[in-house]
Amino acid sequence: MAKQTIPASDEAWDERLLGADEAFVKVAEDDVESDIDESAGLQMISIRLQKPLIEDFKAIASLNGLGYQTLMRQVLHRFADCEKKRLLREFAAEKAARQKAKAKPAPAAEQPAKPKKAA
């Protein structure tokens, strides 16, 4: 039987014609896996989550054609980015308020009101 070849292209990868055949899959050696994690900036963690939450992530990920752990990374990344921006905005607003308060002249001592003259 002749060996079937599929021309490499982005479309072939996207349509899973390349890279998805189990006959060509093998478990990466530990050192290779750690090299991949290192180059991608990934660190393995352990976390306990409620089962319904994990099932929700799996369902959402499946609908979007993702793995649930990939989706979790994306969600955590988005949250961290938004939270950092919120904190920076708050810090900038507080700093601006302090600078504005410093620049404002101190109010002059209030003098008692002069009595009105009778007409």
Image: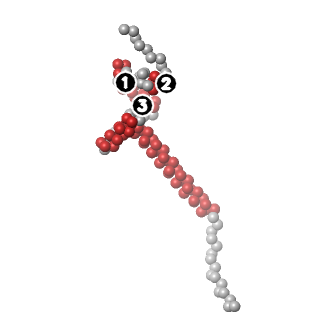
Please say if 53 is above or below 107: above
- First-in-chain label (2 vs 3): 2
What residue would you read off at disc 2? 10
Where's the C terminus, which quadrant? bottom right
Q: Do the residues labelled 1 and 3 touch (CB within 8 Å)?
A: no
Q: What element carries label 2?
A: helix
What residue would you read off at disc 3? 37
Amino acid on which disc 3 is placed = Asp
* Nearer mark to the viewer, of 1 and 2: 2
Q: Is residue 47 visible?
A: no
- First-in-chain label (1 vs 3): 1
Q: How far apart in space, not on screen, are marks 1 and 3 (Cα)? A: 12 Å
* Nearer mark to the viewer, of 2 and 3: 2
Most extreme residue toward the right is: 119
Measuring from the top left, give residue 97's x and y in whole percent: 57, 59
Q: Residue 28 carries which label?
A: 1
Please say if 104 is above or below 21: below
Amino acid on which disc 2 is placed = Asp
| Circle 2 residues within 10 Å: few <14, some 14–19, many ≥20 | few
Amino acid on which disc 1 is placed = Ala
Q: Residue at x 37, y 8 (%)?
A: 1
The one of 10 and 108 positioned closer to us in this rendering: 10
